[in-house]
């Protein structure tokens, strides 16, 4: 299990259990991005706007901050500027910072500040549009659409490749005069100045750690095929627009049409494909 796998498993087992985990965190995931499943990998397939699909957005309500220390198995020692560095060998007396030590392997330390969330607002409209796309053969079962994106103003992610892994972090002047006093202080302005047996590490501003994608449900497509037959060459399953009964079903229960893809469905991007 590499560092990313450790981080992903930790996040999927915690607050973000129904989100896909982005790595590296600098990858720009945008609302409306479209991905195509090809074998055991994902490829970018444009975006909804490029397919003539418009949507409105709304803000979600995520927690403003997030900290994770693998159920207390990560020990953090803080150091204020002007204090003697003691055991923090890579920091000078003038530095503010912290030492992070992992008591167990395959564990993670995460600190995020300034969390915001943007969602596609009208799921019913998207469900109808993607159903029309399937009917007209401009959308199929291999495609996924990004409908929620979580952004972070600043964050730090570390994982342990072995028990006893450790890191020393130097913090910028953004920390108060008293120096860091809590884990969340390590999210902003941190840089790793010493490392031992780390699996993965990331520090920086403007991150996109999590996102959600939707796909058409197999049960919904199966129902359409059973009721109306599969899309035919040169035209869709229907002679013209969606029958009123189908539109009504979508309006009444859009969750029966679209499903948020489970984290277990997340595939790596194809080789050479940017995240």
Image (cartoon, helix red, strand yellow):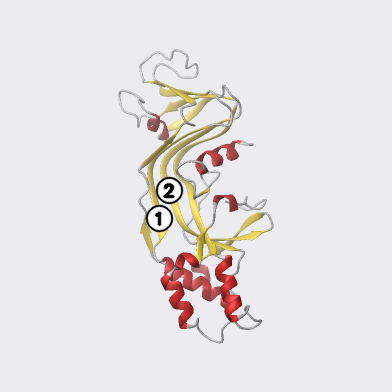
Q: Is residue 53 left or right of residue 42?
A: left
Vertical placement of residue 50 versus 210, above or below = below
Q: Nearer the viewer, residue 3 or 228?
A: 228
Q: Residues within 10 Å of mark 2 (few under 14, many from 20)?
A: many
Count of numbered marks: 2
Q: Where residue 253 sits: x, y (%)?
A: 44, 68
Q: Is residue 80 left or right of residue 191?
A: left
**Helix, strand, or loop for circle 2?**
strand
Seen at 65% across and 54% down, the residue is 41
**Helix, strand, or loop for circle 1?**
strand
Seen at 35% across and 51% down, the residue is 61
Q: Nearer the viewer, residue 237 or 162?
A: 237
Q: CA distance from mark 1 to mark 2?
A: 8 Å
Label located before the other in sequence (1 or 2): 1
Q: Nearer the viewer, residue 97 or 135?
A: 135
User: Where is the N terminus found, in terms of image quarters?
Assistant: top right
Q: Are marks 1 and 2 in contact (CB under 8 Å)?
A: yes
Vertical placement of residue 35 versus 87, above or below = below
Seen at 60% across and 71% down, the residue is 222
- Residue lying farthest to the bottom in this orientation: 239
Seen at 58% across and 31% down, the residue is 106
- Residue lying farthest to the right in this orientation: 39
Vertical placement of residue 61 versus 93, above or below = below
The circle on residue 48 is none
Give the quarter of the image for residue 97: top left
- Residue lying farthest to the left in this orientation: 177
Q: Residues within 10 Å of mark 1 (few under 14, many from 20)?
A: some
Residue designated by label 1: 118
Residue designated by label 2: 151
Q: Where residue 169 sits: x, y (%)?
A: 46, 26
Q: Where residue 270 sits: x, y (%)?
A: 66, 53
Q: Where residue 228 sits: x, y (%)?
A: 58, 81
């Amino acid at each position: 299990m590499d560092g990313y796998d450790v981080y992903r498993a930790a996040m999927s087992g915690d607050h973000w259990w129904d989100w896909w985990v982005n790595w590296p965190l600098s990858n720009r995931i945008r609302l409306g991005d479209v991905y195509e499943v090809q074998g055991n990998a994902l490829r970018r397939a444009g975006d909804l706007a490029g397919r003539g699909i418009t949507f409105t957005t709304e803000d979600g309500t995520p927690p403003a901050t997030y900290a994770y220390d693998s159920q207390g198995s990560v020990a953090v020692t803080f150091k204020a500027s002007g204090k003697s560095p003691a055991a923090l060998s890579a920091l000078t007396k003038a530095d503010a910072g912290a030492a992070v030590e992992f008591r167990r392997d395959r564990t993670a330390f995460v600190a995020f500040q300034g969390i915001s969330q943007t969602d596609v607002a009208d799921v019913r409209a998207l469900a109808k549009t993607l159903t029309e796309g399937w009917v007209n053969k401009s959308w199929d079962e291999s495609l996924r659409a990004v409908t929620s994106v979580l952004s972070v103003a600043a964050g730090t992610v570390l994982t342990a490749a072995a028990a006893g892994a450790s890191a020393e972090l130097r913090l910028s002047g953004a920390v108060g005069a008293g120096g860091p006093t809590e884990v969340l202080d390590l999210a902003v302005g941190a840089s790793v100045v010493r490392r031992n047996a780390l699996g993965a590490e990331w520090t920086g501003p403007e991150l996109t750690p999590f996102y959600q994608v939707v796909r058409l449900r197999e049960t919904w497509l199966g129902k359409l095929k059973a009721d109306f037959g599969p899309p035919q060459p040169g035209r869709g399953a229907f002679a013209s627009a969606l029958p009123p009964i189908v539109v009504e079903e979508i309006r009444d229960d859009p969750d029966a049409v679209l499903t948020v893809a489970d984290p277990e469905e997340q595939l790596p991007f194809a080789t050479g494909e940017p995240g």
